[in-house]
Image: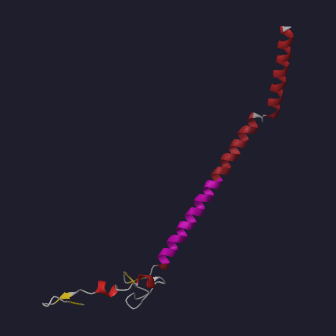
Amino acid sequence: MTDDRDRALHELFGALRGEAAAGAPEFHDALTGAVRRRERIRRARRRVAGITAAVAATALALIILAWPITGGKRVALVDLATTRWEAPTDFLLRTPGAELLRTVPTFTTGGRIHL
């Protein structure tokens, strides 16, 4: 009885080995696939490096061409002293009595404060 069970178990494992072997690729095919994947990765890295170099060169060219230099000095395109900008929320900063914070009080000899 043990021989029958052993033989049946041996046949089942043999069938299982046969199924596993049928689904597994050949060693040469696995190596070829690995070489192809490695080559694909190399091409992708070269492409990314090329794109990065192109972007860096473009950015450098834009910086150099857009940098206004006259006689070694930087040129101001807008005179900031002549411009005035007021933020849309500046009205929130104007509070009642704010003029008291902008002036310095003076004391008189009579004990009164003048603003």
Q: Is residue 40 left or right of residue 68?
A: right
The outermost residue toward the left is: 109
Tell me which segment is drawn in magenta. Answer: 43-65
Displayed quadrant of residue 30? top right
Q: Is residue 92 left or right of residue 111?
A: right
Magenta stretch: dominant SS? helix
Above or below 41: residue 71:
below
Which residue shows up at 82% across the image and 26% down it?
16
Which residue shows up at 48% across the image and 74% down it?
63
Above or below 51: residue 102:
below
Displayed quadrant of residue 68? bottom left
Q: Nearer the viewer, residue 27 or 74?
A: 74
Residue 45 belongs to magenta span: yes
User: Residue 83's spot in the image, x, y percent?
Assistant: 42, 90
Which residue shows up at 74% across the image and 36% down it?
28
User: Residue 91's spot in the image, x, y percent?
Assistant: 44, 85
Above or below 48: residue 92:
below
Q: Quadrant of the N terminus?
A: top right
Count of numbered circles on the image = 0
Q: Nearer the viewer, residue 52 or 81?
A: 81
User: Residue 97's spot in the image, x, y percent?
Assistant: 34, 86
Above or below 96: residue 4:
above
User: Residue 5's spot in the image, x, y percent?
Assistant: 84, 13
Q: Is residue 114 left or right of residue 69?
A: left
Q: Is residue 63 left or right of residue 35?
A: left
Q: Nearer the viewer, residue 39 or 8?
A: 8
Q: Quadrant of the C terminus?
A: bottom left
